[in-house]
Each structure stands twice: as C-alpha cells, then as structure tokens.
C-alpha cells in the first residue's frame, strides 16, 4: 500500500513537470534559445536581417528606428525586400504617406504566432486594426517566418506590405465626386436631420473626429469612421440610388425652409441610405439572403446586383450595387409606442399609475403594460410622442388590457394638437385626429383598431394623449399604441 502511494506521488510530480513545460510561452523561452537578436533592439535586429533590410532603411528614414530602440515592447510585421519592391512609389516618395505606411506594420506590445486566440484584432500605430489569424496571416499578408525575438519585442517576416487601407468613411469621402450616394452622405456634415445633430455640430471639435460627432448619418445610423468596429455598406450606383429615393418621396413630404435645398428629397435620401449599413463585415460567402437594418427594414440581398468584387477596407466591406430594391411595404415600418414610454401625465399624480408584467394567455409569453386603476381625478391622461412619421394614411391600434374589472373601460386617444390656455384651463386644440372614447373589453388581449388618419407633412408627432373617462376614478390602461402606414396606390 505504501509503495502504491509512492508511485502515485511520482506520477503526479511527472505530470506537473510536463504541464509546467507545456504552458511556457515562446516569449518566455526566448531567453534560452541562443538567439543573438535577444541582445539587440528590434530596430537593430531588423536592420541586421538581410531579407528585410530595406524595411530597416525605411524605419530610419521615418524615425521609427528610434521608437523601436526604446524600452517599450513592440511587434513588427516586416515585409521582405521583394515585397517592398511592389509598393507604390507614390507612397515611398511622400514623407507623410511613408510614415503612415511604416506605422501600419508596427503594434504596441508583443504578439507571438502562438496565442490563446486563433484570431485577434490588433491595433497598429496608425490606429488602424489588422486581423492576426492563426500563425500565418496578418491582414492580407502571409507570414513567411514567425517569432524573431529581440530585446524589446518580436518581428515576423511577411510576403506582402501592409499599406494602410481607407476605412469606409474615408472611402465615401474619396468618392463623393463620382457617387451621388457618397456625396449625400458627406453632405450630412453640414445638414442636420434632427435638432440634436445641429447641437452636436456646434460642440464638435475640429479634426478627424468632427464627422463622427456631428454627421447625421454617423450619429444616428452607424459611425463608419470608427476603426474599432466592422461594418458592411451597400453603396448604390446613381441610377439605382435615385430610383429608391424617388420611391420614398411621396412618404416624406416636407416644406422646405431653405430655397437651396429640397427637404422632401433630402429626407427621402436619408430614409433610403439609413437602411444600407450593418454592424458586421459580411464577406461575399457569408452574406445572408435577407438583412434587417437597425430600423427594422428588411430586404433580400440580390447578389446578382453586386458590381465587381467587394471592396475590403480597414473597418469593413463595401459592396457596389446596381440597385438595392426594397419593397415599400418593408420600408414603411409601423411605429410601435410602448405604454411605459410615456412623456408626461396630467390630472393626477405619479402614484395614479403603475407598471405590470402580465402573461398573455393566448401565447403564454410575458409582456409589460401600464395601468392607472383608479385615478383621483377625472380625465387622467398620459402623453406620448412618435418619431419619423411618414406622409401617408395611418391605421391606429391599441392593445389595452382590462383584467381587473368585470365591465368595459372607456378611454380616448387624441393624436397631435397643442396645449392652449383658454381662460384658466389648459385645453388641447387642433388635433390631427380625435378617435373619441372607445371601450376596452374585459380580458381582450387582441389589438383593437381605433381608426385611421392622414399625415400630410412627414416628421415627428410631439403630442399624443391617452385619456381616462370623465368621472373620477375612471381607469386607464395601455400595453402599446401601433401606427401602421399605408402604401399609396
């Protein structure tokens, strides 16, 4: 028995020894591998390596030799002399472009080819990001030999130079003279879609961040100037783009305040392009058949309309499209306002209403609503607002749950209007539509059609009021309001 235990102990020690050896990293092992480069800095090690000596000269020419001779730790993806011979001479002959070119091969901290993550997004000194995939690929270059260690880091020899790519927003700016869609997107630096965009423009600093903070598209859709994230953008050629904009014009009728700008056209462009960006870089092989924008607009991706190859950029992919044909029935998404999303209330206090979580007996799924079971005053009301309403006819539904009484609840919805002081009373005047009092039946979980109304000028509806009955303690209840736009014939 004693011998058996002793053998177990010897086995355990052996296993621990193997585990400790196998867990050591190449960076830790560098001290014992006899590499003379471990006594010199990265700059010296690269300069002394014949295969990449030309890149060593560029380090000296741009001043990065001094950076790589410092005490910080770096990784350098070093192109071979042959790879450098393929670089555009315009880059090599432009001091600023050359400095960016060299910086795009250098990352702070050490990245070995042996890593925990098979794929890693690495920030280069240009603030661009490259994907280090497996042990053999960085960006679109292949690593010829990996893990050349030096005193302050590691360099990998690659078969292709890593010239910094434009990001999606830089590409759009570079093509605004030849693309109507690109020209419009960049124009939103000057024109504000929403009031808060105008306020952001006044506060945004100058420099490369200015567009990200103030351009209406980058603020409200996706910041295509952000190098940290990846995106896909469908950039339509002019004919297809103009056709989609024309489809939207009847639904975005607006009076123009500026004689130099057609507001209907401006907003029709915005509501076309806002649905064409997505927060993921989809390669051609991974493009879904159907995509849904962040605004709920769904459309089929017709790959036969893609022109040429996808444009690979530093923060994603652009597909040049002949057209992206989105059905109006898909583009005109219903507006749903949850009962909890009230903007105010009146003729009562906050204690008049409360939130609930209810199980829908028809679906067995939970949902939230809001209820004022017995307000202390007559005509207790709650206010709501609707954003980005189209110029068309809307059907209006509510879902209101009456599960506490044995008789119907009477309540009223008024869309639009303004508060006006009439004598000593604050009255709601000139509404777009007053649907009158409607009954909320007992334990009816179905949406109820209130009726319809027309909007002639697209935009926001800042005031929607839901009213309880005219007698004190008349209840008020709402799960949601739903506004469904009609497609014009």
Image: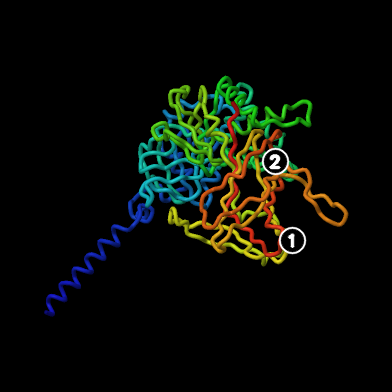
Residue 435's spot in the image, x, y percent? 67, 45
Foreground: 467 or 125? 467
Residue 30 in view, yes or no: yes
Residue that extends furthest to the front in the rendered view of this protein: 407
Residue 107's spot in the image, x, y percent? 49, 45
Foreground: 260 or 207? 260
* Quadrant position of the C terminus in the picture: top right
* 1 vs 2, front mark: 1
Residue 63 vertical position relative to residue 265 in the rendered view, above or below: below
| Left or right relative to 51: residue 465 | right
Q: Which mark is residue 347?
A: 1
Q: Which mark is residue 111?
A: none
Q: Secondary structure at mark 2?
A: loop
State the colouring used for the structure image.
rainbow
Identify the residue position indicated by label 2 in the image: 194
Residue at image position (85%, 52%) is 421
């Amino acid at each position: 028995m004693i011998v058996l235990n002793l053998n177990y102990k010897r086995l355990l020690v052996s296993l621990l020894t193997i585990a400790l050896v196998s867990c050591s990293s190449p960076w830790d092992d560098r001290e014992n591998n006899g590499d003379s480069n471990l006594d010199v800095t990265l700059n010296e090690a690269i300069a002394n390596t014949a295969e990449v000596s030309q890149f060593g000269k560029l380090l000296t020419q741009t001043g990065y030799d001094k950076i790589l001779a410092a005490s910080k730790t770096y990784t350098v993806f070093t192109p071979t002399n042959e790879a450098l011979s393929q670089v555009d001479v315009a880059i090599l002959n432009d001091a600023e472009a050359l400095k960016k070119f060299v910086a795009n091969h250098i990352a702070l901290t050490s990245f070995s080819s042996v890593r925990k993550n098979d794929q890693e997004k690495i920030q280069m000194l240009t603030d661009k990001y490259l994907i280090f995939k497996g042990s053999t690929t960085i960006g679109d270059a292949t690593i010829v030999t990996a893990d050349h260690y030096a005193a302050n880091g590691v360099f990998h020899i690659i078969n292709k130079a890593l010239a910094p790519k434009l990001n999606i927003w830089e590409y759009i700016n570079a093509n605004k003279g030849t693309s109507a869609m690109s020209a419009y997107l960049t124009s939103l630096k000057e024109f504000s879609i929403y009031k808060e965009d105008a306020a952001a423009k006044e506060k945004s600093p100058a420099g490369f961040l200015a567009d990200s903070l103030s351009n209406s598209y980058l603020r409200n859709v996706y910041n295509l100037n952000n190098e940290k994230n990846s995106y896909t953008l469908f950039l339509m050629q002019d004919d297809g783009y103009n056709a989609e904009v024309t489809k939207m014009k009847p639904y975005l009728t607006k009076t123009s305040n500026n004689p130099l700008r057609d507001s209907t056209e401006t907003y029709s462009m915005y509501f076309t392009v806002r649905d064409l960006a997505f927060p993921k870089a989809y390669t051609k092989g991974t493009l879904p058949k159907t995509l849904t924008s962040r605004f709920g607009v769904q459309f089929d991706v017709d790959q036969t309309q893609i022109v040429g190859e996808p444009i690979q950029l530093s923060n994603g992919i652009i597909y040049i499209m002949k057209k992206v044909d989105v059905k109006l029935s898909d583009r005109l998404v219903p507006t749903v306002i949850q009962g909890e999303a009230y903007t105010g209330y009146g003729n009562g206090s906050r204690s008049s209403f409360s939130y609930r979580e209810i199980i829908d007996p028809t679906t067995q799924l939970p949902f939230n609503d809001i209820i004022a079971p017995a307000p202390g005053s007559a005509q207790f009301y709650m206010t709501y607002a609707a954003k980005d309403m189209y110029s068309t006819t809307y059907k209006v539904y509510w879902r209101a749950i009456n599960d506490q009484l044995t008789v119907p609840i009477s309540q009223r919805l008024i869309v639009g209007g303004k508060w006006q002081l009439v004598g000593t009373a604050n009255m709601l005047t000139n509404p777009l539509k007053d649907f009158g009092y409607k009954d909320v039946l007992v334990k009816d979980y179905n949406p109820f059609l209130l009726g319809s109304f027309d909007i002639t000028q697209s935009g926001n509806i800042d005031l929607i009021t839901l009213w309880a009955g005219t007698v004190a303690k008349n209840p008020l209840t709402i799960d949601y309001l739903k506004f469904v736009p009609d497609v014009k014939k």
